[in-house]
Structure formats: structure tokens, C-alpha cells
Amino acid sequence: MQRKVYLVGMDGMMYPMYQKFAQEGVLPNLKCLAENGMVTEVYTSLPAYTPTNWATIMTGAHSGTHGVLRWYVDLPKPKSTEKILNSFVGNAVKAETIFEAAARAGLKSVAFHYPATSPRPTEDLYVIDGFANPAYGSTPFEVTPALVYTNTSGISRTYRIEFTPAQDWSNLPSSYLPHLEFRLPVMLKQNGEDRTFYGLIVDSTGSGYDTIIICTEKDGDTKIASSHAGSWSDWCHQSFVVLGKSREATFRFKTLELAPDGSKLSLYRSQVMMVDEFCEPKELGRELVDRFGPYQEHASPFPYMIGATDLETCLQEMEYQAQWVARAGRYMMEVKNCHLFYCQIHIYDYINHTHLSGVDPASPAYDPARAEEHWQVFRQCYIQADQMLGTILDGLDDDSCIIVVSDHAVAPDRRAINIRKFLYENGFLTVKDPSKGLDRDEAPEENIDWQKTKVFMKSGRGYDIFINAEEGSPEYLKIQHDLIRLLRTWVDEDTGCCPVAIALRKKDAPLLGFWGDQCGDVVFVNEDGYAHGYMSEWGGIKGGGCIGEPLRCGAHHGPQLPTSRTQVASNMGFLLANGPGIKKSYQRPVQELGYIHMTSIVPLICHLLEIDPPAQCQGSLPSDILEAKPSTMERRTEYPEWEPSTVPPREKGRVWVQVDMFDFVDRTSEGENPDNT
């Protein structure tokens, strides 16, 4: 019988966190998988970004080969930003995927919420939400993103509502206190027809207002949802006209806060998600929704991070998404006869960005008095991962293999870099108006003085700098030389450290896995603790310079060395493998073998499925994790009789011996005095 392989992608999961919570005993499924398999850290492709490494994990190719070096891919010219393609679109990946390799072997695959799998590369791949950009409001498969309706001021990106005594209603439900009403608009993010629902605030027990009822009209008989304080409504199914077409969509409500006297209300409305647009083939979406309930693509971390919702609501939505993917994934493997399952759950990346500074003493924002509060957030999220795996494992046959992997982890922000301002202050970047975005580490094309600027950086959080001169020309080579020298000798005066760990010419960038039409003319990587590209989240740099402590500390991945770590955190990826042929209780001796690279995951899966790897796969099978393969080999210590260091010098005459390419020794016997000819 053909083996089945499950790859469970946990974006941002880190090995030190797994170790801590496994030792606490709260991760029984993960711990059991590790004890009967192998677990280790894994070296990420550069840059250590989400789209880059999920592309590597499905192609086995290095960054330069699959072409996803940034969050956007330039089309069609390497230095043109007139046409760009989002890196979460399947066309951005220019290497064959493992799904195509499986299809050649006659095997079907399924991918859930996995970046850049839509449009699907083969009809033998079922795709559920194949865009999976983690940004709020980014998916093309939603009618509109989640929103909080409130009468409380001071919370950003919420919708302000007002309520008044209910008027002109029919079929009102019973209420001890007078009904209050409010309007609840649902505004589409694409061209279409906005809708307005009507809310009622009800006192159902005589103890004060405690229930919200949502209706399509001012008629109690058109009720579509009701929610008590602190509870979720049932799912709503409603039609919306989007781009001239009627789309059925699903959403639900949760009453976050409702004062008994009706003075305060905060009502959360989840993402309005289409029913029949998020899958390939299209009809699969309705089939899965009918069987497993509505699909939710974005699990509310953004409303939580800005303070509009609470942690409990965020975790509840994350748990719903993870369990939905687990149950629907098993259905696809068992009923649709798939043999390869890929998914990507983004829980840990969101939580890392928000809460790592609260548990890591290396962060300037660390407060030991609140550390346990932040630890509890991590603990609950890792328990959710363990429970998701439990759902997948329930009833799994003994011949199946399971791989748990993260694309990267994270390190705390200790020092922030404004790289464009640094280039400007050192005469490499010339802008028309420095007040237009430079303090935010922005230099839009329209603000660059193209007649004078020597270099520029493209939008997004790239590692690379482009030279505004003909490649290979004397001017180009001089700018490249001067810029490399500047980056390599830059010293942070406050710390005495060099913010740039590596700075390479384009011709040397293959050392980092960079090449191809997306590669910059100079590639650089930040030192541990230094990061660039997140100025909007930091809110600026203390003192306003181009380097310093961020105003708001967080944690990020990507710009710094993949091996960055602290006593609490690691920027390395996480890898667990379990199943027939995998060693049991194996932890790779990285001091002797080095780290497994992200490109090795595809060869491992192909080995387990007994199929040929994708055409552009560049990774190698990590044989040491396989049963019947020795992990390491001891160096032989016996000396052969002819080993030079053991052979005595000749007794007479003079002999010069070349011991390596450039060094010679005199092998003349002791007591003789040869000349130097």
C-alpha cells in the first residue's frame, strides 16, 4: 500500500519553546512523536521570511532558484518595480513543486492555507486557500475582513456605533428593559453592494442588558444571529454582491463587552468568508463547508494586537481554524485518496511578534513582573498545536509519516536600523524630499532623484541593494566597492558592535543561496539583535537616528542571521519527523553534522513516498535521520607505516621535503650541516 505523508507547517514555531512546554508535560502528542521519531532545529533559506521558506519547503530549491527573495517579485525586469507580483501567488515560484513530482508518480496531494499554491500547478493538487498571506484583509477570498463595532472611543480601526431606543420594529423579542437598536454596516473591500444589518440590545433575564440580536431588517423574525455577553453566535450564511456577482459568505459574532445598563458595547464580527471561491476545484469549498462548517482564513490576531479584541477571542478563532484544517485534511487524505498533505498554520508567528519581548530578557521591553502572563500565551498556543496534531493522529495508520516544520522562528528586536536613512546620510541614496518617508525607512520611486542617486532599495523587507548604474561598468564597480566597505565597517557607536554581519557583492551572493533575476547588486545580513524593515511597528527609533533602540520593542525574523538566538529564543526553524524508516528518539548532533537545511525537507518526503524529487530540487536527503544509517563516523586513529610524521629522517645526506604547497622541512639526519641549495 502506498505510504501517506502529512506535513504540518507551523509558521514561527521554535525549538526552545517546544522543549520548555514538552518538559512541562503539556504537549503529549508532540512529545510522543519526537520520542518515536526525531526532532531538531533546521537552517532556514535566506532571507528568513515567510514566503521565501514556504517556497523552499515545497520545492527543495534555494531562494535564488525558486525566486522568492522578497514579499514581492519583480516582473519582468530585475530592476523594474512597474510590475510586481505578490510572492504569495503561485506564479511567483519559478521552481517545480513537490505536488507536481507526486502527480508524475500518480499521487494526489492536498494543500491547506499554504502560500503560493494558487493557481494550482497541477490538477492532481487540491488547494484550499492557496494564497495564505498573513496580512489582515489581504486574502482575495473574503468579502471583508473582521471588524469590531463599539461605542467606545480611542480604539483604532474599529467602527463607532451609537444606539437609541428601538423604533419602527415589528416582532420584537421579549425584554425586561426597553429595547435598544443600532445599525451594523458591512462594507465590502471590493466593488459591490454594502449591506446594513440591524442590532437589538436585549435584557432577557431582568438582570440588565445581556444579549445582542442581529437582524437583516427591523423585524425580529429576520434574526440571523444572537450572542450573549462573552459568547459566540451561530454562523450566519448571507449573500453579498461582489464585483457584480452574488456570493454566499459566512461569518459570526461575539459580544466582547456589554454593560448591564447599556452604556458600553463591543461586538466582534468575524471575517466574512466566501463559501465557493477559496478552493481549487471551486466546488470543493462548498463540500468542505457543508461537512466541517465555515472556513475561516484569518484568525483575528490583528484585532487582538491593536487592542480591539481580547486574547481569548483570538485563541478561540485560532483553535477553530487549526481544528478545521485537521479534520478537513484527514477527510481529503482518507476520502479523496490523497497521499501528500501540506498545511500552514500561522499562529506562532503572530504570537512571536507580539509576546516574545515579554518573555525574553534580551529584549529592552522585558518586564519580569509580567513574564508569566506572556509565557501563558505561548503555552496556550503550543497546546493548540498539540491538539491539532492529536486530531490528525487519531486513527492514523502505522504506515503514515508525519512531519512538523516551521519556516523560521524569531529573535527579539534590540536595535532597530533605518537602512534607507543610513544610505541617504552617507551619500548613496538621493531623494527629492527627505521629509517624505525617510524617517519611516521609505523611499518611494517617485521621491528618488534618479539622476543623482547611486543606489536604491525596492519596496518590502529585502536584504538587497540595487546600484543605479550599468552592471559591470566602472561606475557600477566603484559604487559596489564603496558600499561594501561602508557596510562592513559600520559600527553602532552606542554598542560598539557592527550592525551588518555579512555584506557581499552580487557575484558572491550564491554563498547565501542568492542568484537569479531577483538578486540585488549588494546583499547584506544584519548581526544578532539588529533588524530593519519594521519601522511602522517600531514607531521609530529613539533619538531619531538611523540606528538605535526602537520606540516599541517587538520580535522579528528575516533581516538578521538565521542562527540568531538568545537564552530563550531562536531564529532557526523547527523540524520533527516521525514514521516508518525514521530513527526513534533521535536528536541530530549538530556540532558534528551541522544543521539540516530547509531544502532537505522535500528530498526527505520524496524518499518516504518513494518518488523522484521535483526538477529544480537542490536539497539532499539527511540520511543520518533514517534507520539503519549511522549518524556520525569516528575518524580512524591507527597510523599506516608510511605516515610522514612517523618516518625517521635518513642517516646521511640531505633531503628537503614539501609538507604542503608552500612549506618545506629539512629531513637531513641530526648532526649534519647542509647548505640551502
Image (spheres, rainbow, N blue to C red):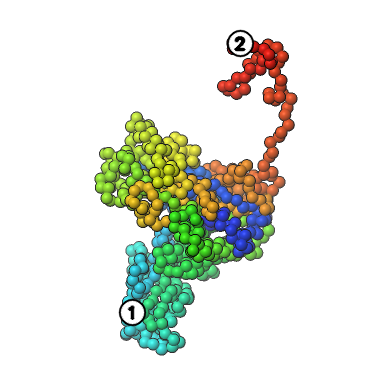
Which residue is at 61% across, 60% downward? 22
Q: Is residue 139 left or right of residue 107?
A: left
Label 1: few (<14), some or many (≥20) within 10 Å?
Answer: some
Q: Depth check: give the residue in front, 523 or 526.
A: 526
Name the residue that disc number 2 marks. 675
Residue 163: numbered disc: 1
For the N terminus, the image quarter is bottom right
- Residue 9 in view of the camera: no
Q: Residue at x 57, y 64 (%)?
A: 383
Give the class, few, some or many, for how many residues have Cα within 10 Å of label 2's Cα (few <14, many ≥20).
few
Question: Looking at the rendered structure, which numbered label has been put on residue 397?
Answer: none
Whether residue 653 sits left or right of residue 156 in the image: it is: right
Q: Position of residue 620 (x, y in %)?
A: 59, 43
* Residue in the picture at 27% in, 42% down: 449
SS class of the residue under badge 2? loop
Q: Is residue 261 left or right of residue 123?
A: left
Above or below 313: residue 39: above
Q: What amino acid does circle 2 point to? A: Asp
Residue lying at 62% horizontally and 42% vertically, measured from the top left:
592
